[in-house]
Amino acid sequence: MKVLLVEDDAALAEALGTALGEAGMLVEQAATGGEADFLVRTERYDAVILDLGLPDGDGSRWLAEWREDAIELPVLVLTARTRWNDKAAGFSAGADDYVTKPFETAEVLFRLHALVRRSHGHAHPVLRIGELAFDTHSGSVTLAGRPVSLTAQESRLLAYLAHAAPRVVSRSELAEHVYDRDHEPDSNVIDVQISRLRRKLGTTRIETLRGQGYRLVDATT
């Protein structure tokens, strides 16, 4: 999962960014609305965490412009404002959910995971594809009830395929959403990691569609 964190408080941004990274997410940061606007329009993200109190204007202004331009990615708003009118303004601008400062990092993680799941059409926190289960909260993976040990990169790759299933995911989409944009892999690196996942999950669980990409499927059907 690739997340854009828009927060001008450097200490808070560092702490929250570290927590998100430890939870298996790729995190890019912006300290102003203008910087966030540029990134949202030029990069692909799975979600945005947006502070409303930005140095170059209210975050809801930028959010409203994204929605007007049909940029529909999930947005979780952060704010120190507690009045309902302020929260209503954020929702009216197009926010999907709201967290008021100060907050527990775990709450941000839970809400963010829920937003991304719902954007892919999943309501339950555990994504199931046949005998394979991926817990979006803990990041744990089981196959027929038995735990599967994955590296951090393998877990990110599987998480993206599980959220997208049964849709086919191209190599370019995986490169954009699973890998840091400063270290985007070539197709061979992705092929190698897919091969490693197949050894752990079964060779028929991840399909390769020539010229299209990969798809996670129920190997029992």
Image: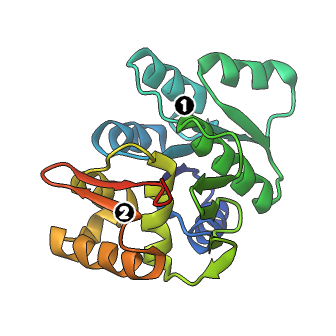
Instruction: Residue at 65%, 72% (x, y): give it.
Output: 140
Q: Position of residue 193 (x, y in %)?
A: 32, 77
Whether 53 is drawn above or below 188: the answer is above
The residue lying furthest to the right in this view is 83
Q: Position of residue 178 (x, y in %)?
A: 39, 62
Is residue 29 at all visible to an observer of this figure? no
Q: Which residue is mark 2?
A: 206
Q: Position of residue 39 (x, y in %)?
A: 35, 44
Whether 96 is drawn above or below 105: the answer is above
The residue lying furthest to the left in this view is 211
Earlier sequence position, callout 2 versus callout 1 = 1
Q: Crowding near pointer 2: few (<14 within 10 Å), some, many (20+)?
A: many
Instruction: Residue at 63%, 56% (x, y): give it.
Output: 9
Secondary element at tag 1: strand
- The amino acid at mark 2 is Ile
Instruction: Residue at 51%, 50% (x, y): give it.
Output: 163
Q: Which residue is mark 1?
A: 57
Is residue 134 at all visible to an observer of this figure? yes
- The amino acid at mark 1 is Gly
Q: Position of residue 71 (x, y in %)?
A: 41, 27
Instruction: Residue at 69%, 39% (x, y): give it.
Output: 123
Identify which residue, 16 or 73, lies in the foreground: 73
Determine whether, in the image, residue 71 is placed left or right of residue 130.
left
Q: CA distance from mark 2 to mark 1?
A: 45 Å
Q: Nearer the viewer, mark 2 or mark 1?
A: 2
Identify which residue, 21 or 58, lies in the foreground: 21
